[in-house]
Amino acid sequence: MSFCLLYFLSMSDYDKEALRLHKKHAGKIHIELNDRQETLDKLKYYYTPGVAAVSKEIHAHPETLSEYTWVKNTVAVISDGSAVLGLGNIGPKAAMPVIEGKCLLFKRFANINAVPIVINVHTADDIVRAIKAISNSFGGINLEDIAAPICFDVESRLTKELSIPVFHDDQHGTAIVTLAGLINACKAIGKDLKGARVVVSGSGAAGIAISKLLKKYEPGIRLCLIDSKGIVSSKRKDLNDSKKAILNLLDSKFKSGTLVDAVIGANIFIGVSQPNILSPEMVRSMAKDPIVFAMANPDPEIDPALAKDSGVAVMATGRSDYPNQINNALAFPGIFRGALDNRITHITDDHKIKAAKAIAGLIKQPKAEKIIPPLSDPKLTPAIAAVIR
């Protein structure tokens, strides 16, 4: 069944077909042998007695692990199921189909072996301990669907304590693709990010990572962050550590108020929050020709048709059935392809910005309806991998 046909199916039909396919194939991935001409005779080399020589070589030279085993091209995709996109805290077992799906994308778009691992522990200490215990089996760690603010602590500690790349895709994949889209959205309408007023609605993993990367890319933007209680500012006494840590990035002029107040005169709205919270009236209160990235899934912060009718110049969502899908799947296969190939131990902000520029650069003449390449673009993964050095 083609993707085009699936777009027109009802959600009930989506559900039925998804359940049928998953049951038919018992999931989405499996393991295959590297040596397609493997014979019983070769077992004496691949297993006993020959394998002992390989183990002794790695024991004597631990740095050769990736040369002799699958570690060179294998990533662990790890979740505790506490923040699954669109579903929330559904636990590790129910998270497995989503994590498997991420592994499918790794293989499909970057030819990386990815192993889905769901863990039934939920504190930062326990998650870090569990991942460190299995880390020698992998060349990289992709954290997925771990709730904020724990996810920040987990990633920070693992990045410091492991010598392989650790990447929380909900944070950085989303931030990279958002930046790529904004670069081209500004080009499409002849605007500049420098000095732009940007409102980010949603202060979880994605919202905070987007805010940090935007300020790193263009320090001149005027940034306002919104959470469920309104504008995030130093006046608030209820902020967690992750929100306190980015206060220095926010425009101090915005001390209090709601989303209604924040968007007045804003040039750009970025939503990673809740559906239908941005009204047409609020859009009309923004600056002329505003850019709106409404990325809540499955229902965006504002319906794209309403946004267009309200004067939005460039509209993007997280959905594949509208133009300009901002999807972290555009970034992470190439990020890890480059990291594994070039033996990168830490993915830096510089890597993230270069990746965003590489994605944006695939659209030679950005237009309002085309600011981001499709996931199917064969140049996408190589372009990103080339800058992760």
Image (cartoon, grey):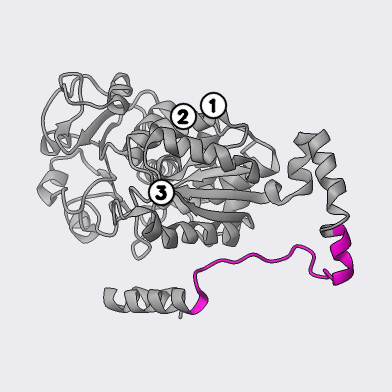
Instruction: Give the x, y percent position of residue 96.
Output: 43, 59
Q: Which mark is residue 160?
A: 1
- 137 or 36: nearer the eye? 137
Mark closest to the chain's N terminus, 3 or 2: 3
Q: Which residue is mark 2?
A: 156
- Residue type pointed to by label 2: Ser
User: For this view, does 237 lie left or right of residue 143?
Assistant: left
Residue 295, x across and y down, in percent: 30, 51
Q: Quadrant of residue 46?
A: bottom right
The residue stretch that appears in magenta: 24-45
Is residue 2 visible from the viewing direction of this image?
no
Mark in front: 3 vs 2: 3
Q: Which residue is mark 3?
A: 120
* Mark sitting earlier along the chain (1/3): 3
Q: Locate residue 364 relative to residue 204 in the image: left or right.
A: right
Indicate whether residue 34 is drawn in magenta.
yes
Kindly indicate whether the residue at mark 2 contacts the one at mark 1 (C-beta within 8 angstroms): yes
Element assignment for label 3: loop
